[in-house]
Image (cartoon, rainbow, N blue to C red):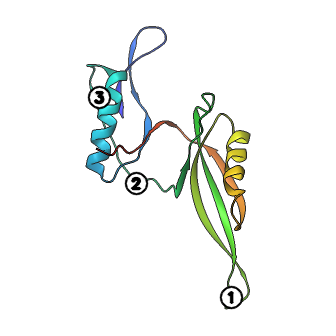
Amino acid sequence: MRYEKTMEDGLDKKVTETYVVDALSFTEAEGCIIEDMKPYVGDKEMEVTALKIASYNEVLLSDKDSDDKYYKIRLNFITLDERNGKEKKTAVDYLVQAATVEGARKNMEEAMSGTMIDYVIVSVIETNIIDLFEHKNI
């Protein structure tokens, strides 16, 4: 999303920010982000500059106000290939909301604590995502 943002010094500056939108189509995603950003942008010009399907298998949101960042966490699920007896690793990406890298790792481990699958956290990377807009049933 590219729009004019009023900065802390009171001046307007064109910025491009990344958002995640839970939508069923590109058309719905574009409409949702424009509608959801209107309260923040007002009558200033805004445009969606790019849309792409995110590779996240699941999103883990936090209810803590301090958790204001989003992290991409890649797990390797470890299973046993019964044909040859070797371990098989399957990469799975999660988007996790947290305040810090350590908090994201903790949130991920808490989410996985109720599962029986063996896994390894391969990476925890802070993203440039500003916010996430969830799907609205109309």
Where residue 58 appears, x then y in whole percent? Answer: 53, 55
Q: Nearer the viewer, mark 1 or mark 3?
A: 1
Q: Which residue is mark 1?
A: 82
Residue sitting at 72 percent across and 56 percent down? 113
Which of marks 3 and 2 precedes in the sequence?
3
- Where is mark 3, residue-wise? 46
Q: Which residue is mark 2?
A: 53
Give the amino acid at mark 3. Answer: Met
Q: Position of residue 23 (x, y in %)?
A: 35, 49
The residue nearer to you, when weighing 73 against 110, is 110
Earlier along the polypeptide chain: callout 1 or callout 3? Answer: 3
Residue in the image at 28% along x and 20% along y: 44
- Looking at the image, which residue is at 66% across and 64% down? 76
Residue 128 versus residue 61: which sits nearer the camera?
61
Which secondary structure, mark 1?
loop
Q: Quadrant of the N terminus?
A: top left
Q: Tell me which residue sits at (63%, 51%) in the image.
A: 73
Mark 1, other Cα within 10 Å: few <14 / some 14–19 / many ≥20: few
**Secondary structure of residue under mark 3:** strand
Q: Hey, which quadrant is residue 43 in on the image?
A: top left
